[in-house]
Amino acid sequence: MSKDLLMSLLLEGSVDTIYMVLLSSMIAFFIGLPLGVILSVTSQGGILRNKPINSILSLLVNIGRSAPFVILMIAIIPFTRWIVGTSIGINAAVVPLSVAAIPFVGRVVETSLREIDQGIIESALAMGATPFEIIYKVLLPEGLPGIIGGLTLTVINLVGYSAMAGILGAGGLGDIAVRYGYQRFMPKVMVATVVILVIMVQLCQITGDKLASLTRHDRKETTD
């Protein structure tokens, strides 16, 4: 394989991987964020305590988090076909990636909100704030650094999951590593895909740490 062809192949695989990770991260965030908020406010000591709802959602989240990703991909193939019309390709891979990430995001958000000082919430209640106002003006702003940190871990996990999805023909760098690095005995391709994935993970971690640091700094300035 020529150098130009290899570079073109890796570039295409990188773009496909970024597409899968970004789209599935957005879907997981928009569904996982309200899920985590509901888990938090309906828990023991929450502002909208509701044991039945909390128990059911917690069970679903635990089931979703315990399923190995490869098994999950195979198990929801009918659902994937129903959503996008196929079980192969980058668009099809977004479905299991999102399904795998949603419970993780939900639990991360719940944990971040639970770490908030209860005194702040009690003060808001004493001032007559409604549950929605407490969620929007107290819980989410106070828990933002932890939420960002959790979302960073989610994105990093999705980078690894997207590579595993390549085993089942999802495309991206994982597919390139399997088809060329493994099946055609091209170790240079395998090494190149691993290096690119490591760089992606490092960039995600650096960006997430920076955003979390900025939100902590803004909170300190607001408090001062």
Image: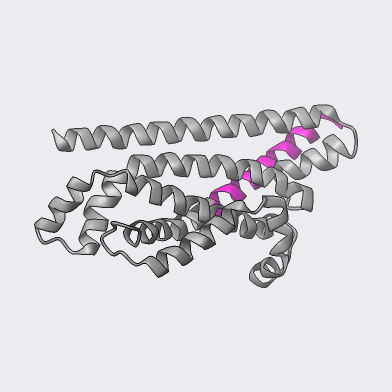
Report if residue 98 is visible in the image. no
Q: Can you say which quadrant of the picture contains the C terminus?
A: top left
Question: Residue at left 65%, top 59%?
Answer: 91
Q: Find out whether residue 8 is within the magenta segment.
A: yes
Magenta residue check for 11: yes
- Asked whether 205 or 7 is in front, the reply is 205
Furthest residue toward right: 184
In front: 38, or 212? 38
The front one of 36 and 93 is: 36
Colour pattern of the rendering: one colour
Q: How many marks?
A: 0
Q: Residue at x 29, y 58 (%)?
A: 46
Mark yes or no: residue 203 visible. Answer: yes
Within the image, what quadrant is residue 183 found in? top right
Q: Quadrant of the N terminus?
A: top right
Which residue occupies 41% across, 56% down? 36
Residue 189 drawn at (x, y percent): 79, 31
Extreme-bottom residue of the structure? 82
Position of residue 139 measured from the top left corner of the image (x, y, whole percent): 27, 51
- Work out whether 47 lies above or below 14: below
Say left or right for 9 vs 112: right
Secondary structure character of the magenta stretch overall? helix
Note whether 39 is above or below 140 in the view shown. Answer: below
Residue at coordinates 55% horizontally, 52% vertically from top-left? 101
Q: Check the image and name the residue furthest to the left.
A: 127
Classify residue 147 as left or right of residue 47: right
Magenta-colored span: 1-24
Q: In the drawing, does residue 6 fall left or right of residue 29?
A: right
